Amino acid sequence: MSVDGLYPWKRVARLAARLVPLLAVTGLLCGCWDRTEIEDRAIVLGISIDKVPPEDESEEEAVTHYVRGLGPPGSDLIRVGVQIALPGRIPLGPGESGGGGGGNDPQKTVWVLDAVGHSVNDALMNLQQELSARLFFGHLRVIVVSEEMARFGLDNVDDYFHRNSEVRRMAWMMVSKGEALSLMKASPKLERVPSLYLMTTLDEGIRMGKFPQDYIGLFWSRKAKLGQEGFLPYVQLKKNQSLQTRGLALFQDSKMVGATLPLDIAVYMALKGNNPGGYSAFVKIRNTEVMTHVTHREAKTTFEIRDGKPYFKFNVSFELNLEEKLNDELDIQDPTVIHEIEESQKKGAAKLIESFIGKTQSLGSDVLGLGEYVRAKAPGYWSRNVGTKERWQRMYKDIGYEIHIDMKIRRIGMKAE
């Protein structure tokens, strides 16, 4: 009990009750004192990054930011394009066109601008000079880099977006075959906002088992590990403005070193045990073919040290549905036929896995993260014999492995034979 008969916490409460009205009047407790109106922001939905051809390097004049007297940086020019949402034009629902009546025309819902510079930040500063609103990256969903840019190296690209606190780690980065800016200018029929179409294509690919999770945050995490390399979706814009996933863009450090075939995506997901299964394949049996569809995968990777080198064992299990046969004379009710299909599928899967691992070894790109198994299970061996990412990249090319595959057909369809 205090001297004046009130508990200390009651005295504090009375003082606060007197101060709150005063603070509210002065605006110190108002939630909108530092507000930024949405119309005052240039909301960036997508970004493209391309190398500038030598014949276009004259665009550098009067746009590059550098300290006078020191000259421009020695790096090559790049072209950065941004897809900006137009206020009031973004569709609000499946049957609406937004306040401005953008309809199904992407050109009425977004604005695509581009500028050149010696770095991503340099190009964006040049682009900012053309806009009255500040560029805002809180809703950035897609970053597209051209294959030429990816093979040159993404050190600057990763550095800028990794440092920017507005960029979400759930955004997608992808490598385009050809010009990246063309994807920002695409006009897909299924989506009125091109960047959202690119994002949805990959998000739905995850849901249907067509593509593994590979958000930009995961790419950075994999790339930073000593025993693993990153990969990105390798895509191409078709003539009908649809997006085709051509495979995985394989990286070594920050440089793209090669690309896989589309079916290699299924091989990667099988070796990692990603579900659901989403790929189908033809299987040849008794001079005819049947089509099977993978519904579930399980995988376990182990290793041991043989002759001073890591030796890996891949155990992969598949569950299949038989979806189609091309010859009515084939009796799929016969257990021996089902067994032949399973064995034929097993041989085909083994060849695909060997081809995929061989390709990654020749490129020195350990996208499976086998080096991380060694670091986790044999830290002493890693410290004595590997130690650095560069040494693992060389050692990965010569590692041995064996593959064990189990195939089970669970369903053959509903048609009565």
Image: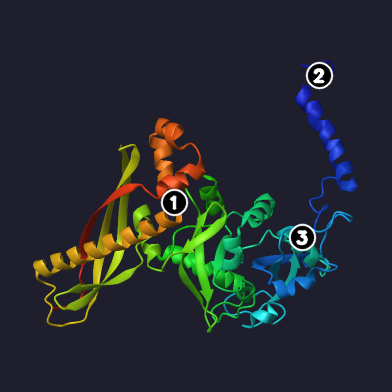
Q: Nearer the viewer, mark 2 or mark 3?
A: 3
Give the Cα distance between marks 3 and 1.
Answer: 33 Å
Left/right of residue 80 with respect to residue 31 in the rendered view: left
Please say if 290 is above or below 300. below
> Residue 64 placed where, x, y %?
81, 63
Label 3 sits on a secondary structure element that is: helix
Residue at x 47% of width, y 70% of height: 245
- Residue under label 3: 122
Residue at x 89% of width, y 42% of height: 22
The dot on residue 5 is 2
**Of 217 and 396, the residue lying toward us:** 396
Residue at x 86% of width, y 37% of height: 19
Give the residue type at disc 2: Gly
Q: Quadrant of the C terminus?
A: bottom left
Please say if 296 is above or below 227. below
Q: Earlier in the sequence, mark 2 or mark 3?
A: 2
Residue 120 visible: yes
The dot on residue 366 is 1
